[in-house]
């Protein structure tokens, strides 16, 4: 059976998904109260326009600057994310959503805005910058079913940034069980933090583990994609999600740099 994520890109073998980082939301420490929500929309709209013009296959919206991140966010987060995504969503390419780190908010936003996919950590237990991080794949997938949102692909990050697993299983073992028991629509492999990529040996091991149980489930590079190395990474991964390397000076919280965005797409297409 074709995975939900592959169905979003029927004519694209290795989709390039660019991040549209939403500035800090209301109630978070870095929120710009003077600019308000209108400033969030203006910032994100400009970045989305640049990413679409550069030729990316999809855009994913994320509350990247809500530092420090919450595991249980309030209803205002979903409401504001939904407004920003609705006003800034691209017309010609698919889009997804992510919320660091509350899958309920991501799913609610995806349903409200018509997103095709979302990215979250929904399996495992982690020690992290946010404290002890327990997840619940069963609750997330049941909520998707309750909301009649079965066409929204859930990409499961098996090596989240700023965290390490509780236990001794390898990332390959975690990936295999996430496909089999957590019903992942895609497996994401990350490095230790935003902008840092995983070891290529780990990416390859995850690729082989997933192929052994369901080769239709894509394995996607989630962090550390750069123009200089993306060609090599795409010989292993089925696509990538990229954010930091597209920004001015390669800094995660800067605006998207049009030249960097075009160079990345050119390098990946080659």
Image (cartoon, helix red, strand yellow):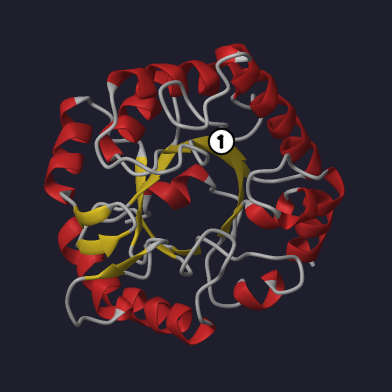
87 left or right, relative to 47? left
Residue 73 picture location, percent across and down: 29, 31
Identify which residue is drawn at 58% across, 16% down: 87
Q: Residue at x 20, y 41 (%)?
A: 140
Q: Is residue 205 left or right of residue 34?
A: left
Q: Residues within 10 Å of mark 1 (few under 14, many from 20)?
A: some
Asked whether, in this view, residue 67 is left or right of residue 74, the answer is right
Viewer-closest of 53 and 134: 134
Q: Which residue is mark 1?
A: 94
Residue 264: percent from left, percent from top:
77, 58
Q: Quadrant of residue 81?
A: top left
Vertical arrangement, residue 168 with respect to residue 156, above or below: below
Give the farthest residue toward the right.
259
**Quarter containing the C terminus:** bottom right
Q: Is residue 248 above or below residue 150?
A: below
Picture layout, residue 70 above or below residue 251: above
Location of residue 123 in the rendering, given as x and y in whole percent from the top left corner: 21, 58
Q: Is residue 50 left or right of residue 122?
A: right
């Amino acid at each position: 059976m074709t995975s939900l994520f592959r169905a979003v890109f029927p004519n694209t073998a290795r989709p390039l998904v660019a991040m549209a980082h939403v500035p800090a939301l209301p109630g978070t420490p870095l929120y710009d109260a003077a600019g308000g929500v209108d400033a969030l929309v203006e910032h994100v709209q400009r970045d989305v326009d640049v990413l679409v013009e550069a030729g990316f296959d999809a855009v994913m919206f994320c509350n990247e600057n809500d530092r420090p991140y919450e595991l249980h966010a309030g209803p205002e987060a979903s409401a504001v994310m939904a407004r920003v995504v609705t006003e800034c969503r691209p017309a010609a390419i698919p889009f997804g959503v992510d919320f660091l780190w509350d899958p309920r908010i991501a799913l609610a936003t995806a349903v409200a805005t018509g997103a095709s996919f979302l990215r979250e950590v929904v399996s495992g237990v982690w020690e992290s910058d946010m404290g002890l991080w327990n997840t619940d794949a069963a609750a997330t997938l049941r909520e998707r079913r309750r909301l009649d949102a079965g066409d929204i692909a859930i990409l499961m990050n098996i090596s989240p940034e700023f965290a390490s697993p509780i236990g001794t299983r390898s990332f390959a073992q975690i990936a295999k069980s996430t496909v089999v028991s957590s019903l992942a629509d895609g497996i994401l492999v990350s490095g230790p933090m935003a902008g840092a990529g995983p070891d290529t040996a780990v990416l390859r091991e995850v690729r082989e583990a997933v192929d052994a149980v369901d080769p239709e489930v894509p394995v996607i590079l989630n962090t550390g994609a750069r123009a200089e190395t993306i060609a090599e990474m795409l010989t292993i991964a089925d696509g990538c999600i990229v954010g930091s390397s597209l920004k001015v000076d390669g800094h995660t919280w800067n605006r998207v740099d049009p030249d960097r965005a075009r160079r990345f797409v050119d390098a990946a297409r080659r």
